[in-house]
Structures are given as structure tokens and as C-alpha cells.
Image: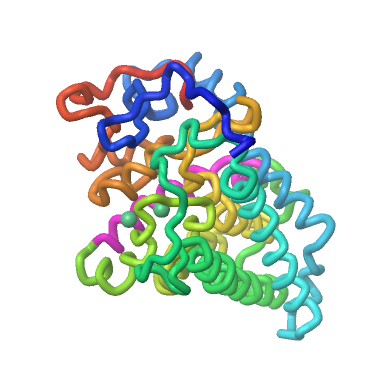
Amino acid sequence: MPNQPSSETASETRNAKGEWRPPYGIKYAPLLSWPWRPLQVLKWLVSYPGFALPTNLLLLAISALSWMLTQPEVARCAHFKWDWMLWILVRNQALIWMYYGAYYLWLYVWKKEGTKGKYDRRWPARNSRVFLFNNQVWDNIFWTAGVSGLIWTGLEWLTMWLYANHHIPYLDWNEHPVWFVAWIIVIPFWREFHFYWVHRAIHWKPLYRRVHYLHHKNINPNPWSGMAMHPVEGLLYLSVALIHWVIPSHPFHFLFNLQHAGLGPAGGHDGFEGPIVHGKFPTGSYFHYLHHRYFECNYGESTLPLDKWFGTFRDGLPEGEGATLKDEHPGKG
Ligand SMILES: [Zn+2]
Ligand SMILES: [Zn+2]
């Protein structure tokens, strides 16, 4: 493989099975860590990598461009008509293929990082009966772009129709600029909170066996595993954006929330510990990888310490070493 880097970094540690693990325990973002350090929080909010940069701002920029360049006018959506509906469908599919595709191309087709920082050295499964078409990636694309992508689009059709017909509360940018901005900041946190509880719910055995098992076929995830979900899970997961049916918001907030949920999982499942792209682009979620690897831990993500509070946190260190959760790795979060 010509693109494969010849050596792995010094921080690269693998166990006897060849599984990658960080030489440090996973840590939470400082936002709600105790003791509370306001300066660290501030630094985390604005630094690179941090809360805003790069992922949240990138997703916000995608939503802003989508809104300005591609979103049909709200008034047009008062009736279910194919012109605007088809437009949204095609736009969403284009977003999915470009966003998930970019991660997949870089890491799995061009293999630009080799296996450096790859949590599981193996590449996605082929000839495996576990997956549709006997192929993990094709299976994942079917569920992510096909099924979850259609649910995403359906929710958007319905919500645009609700806005256009004044059936749900509306927040005007000119009248409430502070709320408008506050919503944008709150959405990533709301997403994480919602995800944690939905995720715990679908780990309830009867739901797990019928619904969530499908996502967990991906013990070794790749970007396309992100929304590889049973339709019930897809609906529950994307219901994160239905908060805008209840709390006054601008349709842009709804769009951002939905696109954040729809695109975000690509990076969270890419299977690599960043930074990638010549060490410049932080990505990957060892936190969520551990959930795929061990199932009964780390249901949320690493900003809100919900797993820690509810006793489901696993830091990735070998048994015993990870007993203290206070130690923080300076380079993460
Ligand atoms: Zn997952
Ligand atoms: Zn799960």
C-alpha cells in the first residue's frame, strides 16, 4: 500500500490483540468537570480543537450554506408538492454522500492514514453474512443514506409544512436575536443529552433485540456505520430535532439540529483517533468506539459527563489503571 505511513507514532499503543488504545484515559470536556475551572472552559470553547472548532462550526457552516443556497422558502412548503420536496430530498442525499463520503474516501479508499490511530486494525468486513449484501460498507450505506436519510428528509418535509402553516411556534431573528444565537449554541449540548437517553432506552433488552442490534453489528465501525440504524432507532435518534415543534425556534435551528444529527455520526464512527489530514483535523471518538467494542458503557459522548454521573463510564485504560477518572489528558477536548 503506497499511501500507508511506514511508522506509527510513539503514542500508538496496541494490546496483544492488536487493538489500539490511547496511552491516556478518555477525559471529558472541562465544561462540567469538577473542580470547575473557568479558564479551561473558556479555552475549550474557543481553542482548536475545542467545542466550536472544527466540527461544530463546520456543521454550522454547512447548515448556513444549506439554508441560504438550497432551502426552499418556508411559504412554499404550505402544501406537500413534489417540487420543493424533491429538492430537499436531493440536497440531503448530496450532503450525506459528500460528508460521509469524504471521511470514507480519505480513510478507507485512499487509506491516507494507513492504520495509524485505527482503533481496530481490520478493514470493514467483506463476505460476512452478518451484513446485508455480505458487505459491511454496502450494508452501512443502505441504512445510513437510504433508510436514515429518508427518515431525515421525511421529518424535514413535515416540519417545513408545519412552519409554513403556523402549526408550530416560530422565533423571529429580528425580534429575538439573543435567543436566536443561544439556540445555536445549545443545540450540540441538547443533541448529546437527547442521544444519551435515547441510547440508554434502546439498550433495554426488548428494544435492543428488535432495534438497536442492527447498529451494533458494527463492532469495528467506519464512517458509514454512523446512521446504520433500524428505522425505529433512526426515528428516535433524529427526533432530537422535534424539540423545535415545542419550543419557539426559527426553521434554521431545526435545520441545524437535524443536519448536526444527520452528519455528525460520520466523524464519531470513522474508526480512527485523529488528528488526521497531516495531523490537522481532529476526528474520531474513542469514547463511542468503546461503546461499539464493549456495548454496556459510554452511551453518551464526552462533553456532558452523563455516563460518569450514571455509572456507565469506561475510560479505555486496562482494568485497574483507569480507576481514577480525574486525570486529564491535555491534548483532548
Ligand atoms: Zn455508534
Ligand atoms: Zn448502543
Where residue 293 sits: x, y (%)?
30, 47
What's drawn in magenta, residue-wise?
Answer: 181-203
Give me the residue at 26% from left, 51% from top. 295
The quarter of the rendered structure image containing the N terminus is top right
Residue 55 appears anywhere in the view: no
Q: Is residue 218 above or below residue 186?
A: below
Residue 20 image point, x, y percent: 36, 33
Q: Residue furthest right?
A: 69
Q: Which residue: 38% across, 44% down?
A: 288
**Ligand number 2: quarter of image:** bottom left
- Identify the residue shown where x is 51% and y is 23%: 7
Q: Position of residue 9 (x, y in %)?
A: 48, 20
Task: Relative to 119, say whether 238 is above or below.
Answer: below
Residue 200 among magenta residues: yes
* Residue at 76% from the left image edge and 84% from the top image edge: 82
Instruction: Please indicate whether residue 250 sits to the left or right of residue 31 in the image.
Output: right
Viewed as shown, does residue 167 lie left or right of 78? left
Principal SS element in the magenta part? helix
When asked about the image quadrant of residue 28, the answer is top left
Which of 314/181 is in front?
314
Q: Nearer the viewer, residue 5 or 28?
A: 5
The residue furthest front is: 1
Give how far across and how far down residue 144 sits, in percent.
Answer: 53, 65
In terms of depth relative to the viewer, which is nearer, 71 or 24? 24
Please name whichever residue, 275 or 68, is drawn nearer the observer in this view of the structure: 275
Task: Evaluate whether residue 68 shows in this view.
Answer: yes
